[in-house]
């Protein structure tokens, strides 16, 4: 048995969101690492019987490995606050704000962080007419992992051909050409900058399929851009009120220098899969995976 303060850990995974499959992998990887670190771990697939399973497990801490709505939008955090079970990652307010991409951008802008033009429109409007001049992106404003992302290129014949299962309200966002960059924040420290290389858009397939993308850590970008990415990510983490580990994604138009760097979103529960960015950055900084998830457990609390 571990001599740590918290010994029995419930890893929440799965759940009902569009990111269920990724969450199952994250939960499995984190549970295995925590067992290696000496914790007593029970894995719980978050379904309608969650309350009963949590009560039976009687954990010291919940490691929240859920992704997407209900798991990282403040809902699960509220349940755990009510149950008075310490948990990992951000609290109710920060989780809800970061999941809402429009609210996130409003907070970024209020703290002097660079954002691109964006607006909410109905899905029917986005199907019928261009909400802004191409190129632009259409996506749900309250999902993660690039689920349901559509790019309308410059010179497109018509607006986005959205699937029928898209939400009634979507966000249109000006497309920034150039490079996809990402920064993990761990507590009060921005770890590094990753340059994400793909053959196209960094979509769901590119994020999670083996070989879907290549990650360069640290990113080979000018020092001014590297330092700005670290600064922006830490400021975003703090502005949203995040706790534990978060990851902020950025786009950089190299032709515009520092004026071409923009924040896209902050993920309060980054993936912990074999292809995930946060564990790669931690390893680059000398923090192995087991140590990373152990730190997250020791950092857990209520009233986050």
Image (cartoon, grey):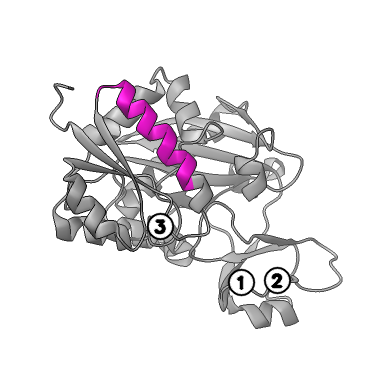
Q: Which mark sits nearer the N-terminus, 2 or 3?
A: 3
Q: CA distance from mark 2 to mark 3?
A: 24 Å
Instruction: Residue 258: name its quadrant.
Output: top right
The question of residue 36 being in magenta is answered with yes
Q: Position of residue 93 (x, y in %)?
A: 28, 60
Q: Which residue bears the numbered disc 1?
A: 166
Real-space CA distance between mark 1 and mark 2, rounded to the nearest whole angstrom = 7 Å
Residues tagged 1 and 2 counted as in contact (Cβ below 8 A): yes
Closest to the observer, 205 or 157: 205
**Could you tell me residue 36's position as x and y percent?**
33, 21
Vertical order, 269 against 299 (above or below): below
Separation of marks 1 and 3 at Cα, in angstroms: 20 Å
- Rate crowding at label 2 as few (under 14), some (14 to 19) or many (20 or more) other CA atoms within 10 Å: some
Q: Which residues are magenta?
A: 23-38
Please state the horizontal and vertical placement of residue 161, each as a whole percent of the image: 75, 71
Q: Magenta region's main secondary structure?
A: helix
Q: Which residue is mark 3?
A: 98
Residue at x 43% of width, y 56% of height: 108
Say which mark, if any, is on residue 48.
none
Residue 231 in sight from this viewpoint: no
Q: Quadrant of residue 40?
A: top left
Quick one: 271 or 266, which is closer to the camera?
Answer: 271
Q: Residues within 10 Å of mark 3 (few under 14, many from 20)?
A: many
The quadrant of the picture occupied by the N terminus is: top left
Eye-nearest disc, 1 or 3: 1
Residue at the top extreme? 286
Q: Residue at x 31, y 48 (%)?
A: 242
Q: Which residue is denoted by mark 2 in the rendering?
A: 162
> Which residue is depicted at the point 67% across and 36% down?
213
Around disc 1, counting alpha carbons within 10 Å, would you say few (fewer than 14), some (14 to 19), or many (20 or more)? some
């Amino acid at each position: 048995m571990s001599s740590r303060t918290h010994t029995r850990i419930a890893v929440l995974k799965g759940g009902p969101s569009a990111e269920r499959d990724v969450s199952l992998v994250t939960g499995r990887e984190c549970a295995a690492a925590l067992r290696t670190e000496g914790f007593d771990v029970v894995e719980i697939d978050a379904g309608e019987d969650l309350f009963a399973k949590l009560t039976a497990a009687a954990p010291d801490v919940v490691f929240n490995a859920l992704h997407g709505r209900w798991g990282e939008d403040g809902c699960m955090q509220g349940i755990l606050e009510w149950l008075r079970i310490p948990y990992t990652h951000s609290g109710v307010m920060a989780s809800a704000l970061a999941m809402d991409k429009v609210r996130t951008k409003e907070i970024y802008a209020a703290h002097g962080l660079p954002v691109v033009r964006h607006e909410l429109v109905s899905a029917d409007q986005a199907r019928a007419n261009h909400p802004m001049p191409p190129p632009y992106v259409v996506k749900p404003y309250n999902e993660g992992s690039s689920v349901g992302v559509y790019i309308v290129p410059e010179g497109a014949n018509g607006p986005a051909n959205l699937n029928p299962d898209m939400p009634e309200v979507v966000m249109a966002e000006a497309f920034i050409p150039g490079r996809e960059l990402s920064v993990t924040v761990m507590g009060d420290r921005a770890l590094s900058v990753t340059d994400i290389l793909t053959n196209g858009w960094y979509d769901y397939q590119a994020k999670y399929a083996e070989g879907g993308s290549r990650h360069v850590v640290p990113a080979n970008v000018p020092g001014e851009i590297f330092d700005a990415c670290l600064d922006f990510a830490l400021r975003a983490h703090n502005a949203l009120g995040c706790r534990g580990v978060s990851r902020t994604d950025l786009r950089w138009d190299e032709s515009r220098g520092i004026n071409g760097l923009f924040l896209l979103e902050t993920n309060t529960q980054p993936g912990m899969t074999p292809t995930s960015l946060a564990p790669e950055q931690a390893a680059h900084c000398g923090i192995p995976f087991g140590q990373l998830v152990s730190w997250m457990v020791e950092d857990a609390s209520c009233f986050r």
